Image (cartoon, rainbow, N blue to C red):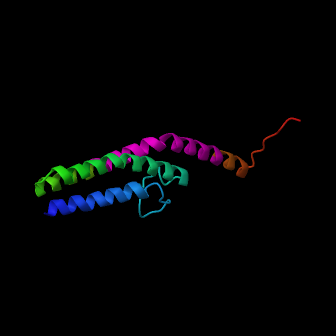
Amino acid sequence: MFGKIMTIFTFALMVFCTITFGFVKKNSYFGIRTKITMMSEDIWHKAHIAGAIATVPFDVILLLIMIFVEASETQLWLTLLTIIIWSIVVLVVSGLAVREDAKKKKIHEEKELKEQIKKESGYRIWVKK
């Protein structure tokens, strides 16, 4: 019985994540919070859209577990395994989805920093007229 309850609860939580990942704003409480996703709002949003898409197959898997697996203990273990695999897949997929954007942002920030250092150190750019 406990396995069935946990599977239903986990299924509801996964559907909630699938729906809300597309709408959640950058914050420090809910969502995929990694160093890369916290870089900007655009990267955050793109990672969460990819995470929501990656969550859909796991929603289906949990639904199939609820329908076809009758043993409560088996349901519990399959649900736990699904959660572990889902966590890894969502992190990998969201990381791959935003890797290029993160690289571009980092290069842009480094370029801006170098320009700011030049300005502050008295470096002058002479333009020929």
Q: Residue at x 13, y 52 (%)?
A: 74
Residue 109 lies within the magenta run: yes
Residue name at image x 65 percent, y 47 percent: 112
Relative to 102, is 38 above or below? below
Residue 87 in the magenta stretch? The answer is: yes
Residue visible at 52% across and 52% down in the picture: 39
Task: Return the x and y of residue 89 as percentages of the image width and height.
Answer: 33, 45
x, y percentage for residue 120? 71, 52
Question: Hey, which residue is sitting farthest front in the picture?
Answer: 67
Q: Residue at x 42, y 44 (%)?
A: 95
Assign the N terminus to one quadrant of the image.
Answer: bottom left
| Position of residue 23 measured from the top left corner of the image (x, y, whole percent) | 48, 58
Left/right of residue 5 with respect to residue 42 in the rendered view: left
Please name whichever residue, 78 or 102, is drawn nearer the observer in this view of the structure: 78
Front-lying residue, 78 or 126 = 78
Name the residue nearer the viewer: 98 or 104: 98
Quadrant the C terminus occupies:
top right
Q: How many marks?
A: 0
Instruction: Specify the segment rendered in magenta.
Output: 85-113
Which residue, as the protein is rendered here, is positioned at the far top?
128
**Where on the picture, by quarter, is residue 8?**
bottom left
Left or right: 49 in relation to 87: right
Question: Residue 78 location, x and y as percent?
Answer: 18, 51
Type of secondary structure dominating the magenta stretch: helix
